Amino acid sequence: MAQPESTEDRGPRPDKTALLSLGIVLLFSPLAALCLLPLLLLLEFTGVPLWLGYGLWALSAGLYGLRPVQLALARLLWPARRPNPDEHERLDAVWSEVLRRAAVSERRFRIWVVDLDEVNAHCVGRDLICVTTGALAELGDRELAGVLAHELGHHLRMHTAAAAFLVWVLLPLQALALIGSGLAAPFSELGRRLSEFEFDAGVKHRTLLALGRLEMGLRGCFAAPGVLAFAVKNAASRSAEYQVDAFAVDLGFGAELLSALRWFEACAPPAAPQPLVPGPRRARHAAVKSPRPTHPPLERRMARIAARVAAADTLLE
């Protein structure tokens, strides 16, 4: 069911999911800053004061909000480009209708194309949406409109911008996990070597057990802050998917989005398992076939969309 149109331009505003991401930043920033301390102390010997090092770290996170930086990162991480004339004509027609129903200015957001065969779309930064050539080839205009409405919902609620800021600021926590793995590696190697020797079975068992627990303890302690932070972030991301699905339905694109997800369920190959803590090339996608930490199960999303569409149709009767 399409909502009544408004002449007021609706710009991006953070919702509870985006605010939660920023809250996690505030909660874990002191620990992230502590993780940076050894590196910054080394830089201090070269004449770089601590305050400047921390200032550059904070500034680097803030720079992500700038359009040139977002475009540079998009080109670095994906084969992204501006649409060619044919792609632009098609995307402009579909996108204009989505923006019209959402009462959003066409100047606020941009759409680029990613040269990938997979059928997908994702948000970058605060105002860029990337659509794959696979999506343009396989999806009809109706399905494409549903997917774009979903992605617009992420931008209007500032999900992607807040999540990217969170990941950037908390990168030191991932470095902390790597340090833990490095400290645990000698105990792992010692256990492997001891297992090759023959001596008292009881002593050998207890020694290997102690080394194994020490190794796992080191890895767990150093990885725990990052795992906890990203677990909360991923839980918020799953909730965000339901929210923007509902946004697409309320704009009148529920059937279109549902059709796109059904196509994906029927035709797309299974995706590879994804890690709890994302790497630098992870992106927010409109549809995933296999479970991912940042997305709820596809069938559950489809059920909720169908129920909301049915409820909207009932109100119209």
Image: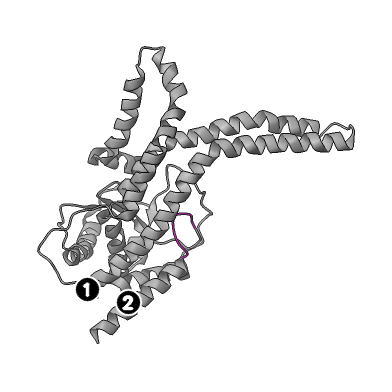
Q: Is residue 176 above or below residue 258?
A: above
Residue occupying image coordinates x 49% and y 33%: 175
- One can see residue 77 in this view: no
Residue type for callout 1:
Ala
Q: Indicate yes or no whether the magenta region holds residue 98.
A: no
Image quadrant in which you'd find residue 2: bottom left
Q: Which mark is residue 259?
A: none
Image location (x, y in percent) of residue 247: 28, 65
Q: Cα distance, mark 1 to mark 2?
A: 11 Å
Magenta segment: 292-297
Query: Is residue 90 left or right of 202 when viewed as pictured?
Result: left
Q: SS class of the residue under badge 1?
A: loop
Image quadrant in which you'd find residue 28: top left
Image location (x, y in percent) of residue 128: 27, 50
Q: Is residue 187 above or below residue 295?
A: above
Q: SS class of the residue under badge 2?
A: helix
Q: Is residue 250 above or below residue 290?
A: below
Q: Which mark is residue 309?
A: 2
Q: Which residue is mark 1?
A: 2
Q: Is residue 305 above or below residue 242?
A: below
Magenta stretch: helix, strand or loop mostly: loop
Q: Quadrant of the C terminus?
A: bottom left
Residue occupying image coordinates x 34% and y 75%: 308
Residue occupying image coordinates x 24% and y 38%: 68
Q: Quadrant of the N terminus?
A: bottom left
